[in-house]
Amino acid sequence: MRTTTRLLIGAAIAGSASSTPLSSRQTIQCAPIPSPFPSYSQLPVQSSLPDPFLPLKYTTLDNAAGSSTFAQDIMAGKGQHRVQSPEEWYKCRQPEIMQLLQEYQYGYYPDHSLEKVEATRSGNTVNVAVTAGGKTGKFKATLSLPTGASASKPAPVVINIGGMQNAPYLSAGIAVVGFDYTSVAADSNSKTGAFWDVYKGRDIGVLTAWAWGFHRTLDALNLTVPEINPNKVGVTGCSRLGKGALAAGLFDTRITVTMPMSSGVQGLGPYRYHGLSGQDETLENSKSGAGWWSNSKLGTFVNHAENLPYDAHTIAAAIAPRALVIDQGTGDAYTDSKGTAIVAYPAAKVVYDWLGAGDKIAMSVRSGGHCDMSGFTSVLPFVQKILLGTPTTKNYNDLGKYGSPMTTAFPWATALPTSKAS
């Protein structure tokens, strides 16, 4: 039986991703994180994507000194006290992004150190039980192993919710595991399911609850399925479930590759520039139609999305240097495939490139519509590269019919901090 560990991304990467000696990293002084966090009225209107290199303290109107050009300056990358090195990013800015995303969107992820995870396996079914604070939540996962997987030759795994194309992944030697996301957290305001059995009453979004389900499934696989390699893990889902898969990759450093499909707003569709594809999934209609996906704080930004101190590119950048592949179909206008491809993806890639991890982020622009199953085969060569080390010649920087990045959406990229990874 294998033991498991779980780490939030900020804490883990701050201490592990950089090769800089600890003594050097300790000399970096992080900007204090505002407490309390500023409300939308204390944040400037930013019509373009916020500068990911600028700490929140230097984004608030309290630090504007009455300057009428403050918002223009920070959007253009002229904000003072930007992080200056990858070491400072991992030690200071990335953990801050993790906190602000929990404050403004996801709700605060439960402390896994207070949980006890138990699991049993019966054939291809894995039964999961999680206990914390005297309360227990239970759900099941279903396992499909590729031919030849064994304890001595464990296979990488992709955990999914909502279903995927299993056959190509199994043929490639990748295990596929699914769990019933509705038994973890109902896609409603009912607060029912295993997550709420343990954490009812907390201001946490259902996307975070589904992310928790991914993580506890991985714990259970570690405990009961030696045929799976716990160091080679992908997570995926489509549409609202793609938003949940993105959260899963964000909150757990054990996730090797995150694979959000057709994820839209609250995924990798930008809050700003949401109408580029001709239709509109917006903060406003996602909150009115499915307000339970996020915490209550995000609702205070309805009609004020341009005051958010982050956007989809910030969420993506916080996953770096781990791998991320984004799928969108050109026939999927509602989730703003164009905005994802020419705004969110290239803005996030600027950060990945700066961190020296540019080969770990990919954009898959395919033909077809929303949640077309062909998306899973479209991203497979990149997934094989990450999980199996198989080279691919496919160009995942090709934006297809969308052409080139919309660089006017992220003007701060023309003035990057100079100390980047070599």
Image: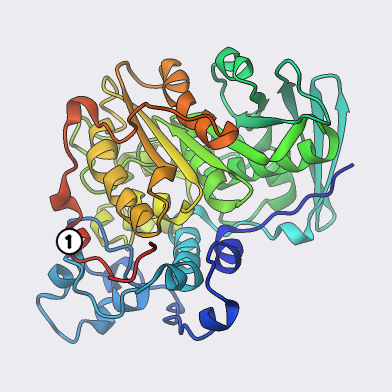
Q: Is residue 270 visible?
A: no
> As displayed, is residue 322 above or below residue 234?
below
Residue 44 pos. (x, y %): 22, 69
Residue in view at x 35 percent, y 49 percent: 312
Judging depth in this view, the residue of 202 and 344 nearest the camera is 344
Residue 187 pos. (x, y %): 55, 34
Residue 390 pos. (x, y %): 53, 29
Say left or right for 411 vs 399. Answer: left
Q: Is residue 376 visible?
A: yes
Say left or right for 134 vs 32. Answer: right
Label 1 environment density (alpha carbons within 10 Å; few <14, some 14–19, many ≥20): few
- Quadrant position of residue 182: top right
Judging depth in this view, the residue of 353 and 81 nearest the camera is 353
Judging depth in this view, the residue of 203 and 223 nearest the camera is 223
Residue in view at x 49 percent, y 61 percent: 98
Residue in view at x 57 percent, y 60 percent: 108
Say left or right for 53 vs 180. Answer: left
> As displayed, is residue 366 above or below residue 65?
above
The amino acid on which the numbered mark 1 sits, given as a three-letter code, is Thr
Residue at the limit of the structure toward the left, as seen here: 68
Instruction: Report the residue marked by disc 1.
Output: 414
Residue 273 pos. (x, y %): 20, 44
**The C terminus, quarter of image:** bottom left
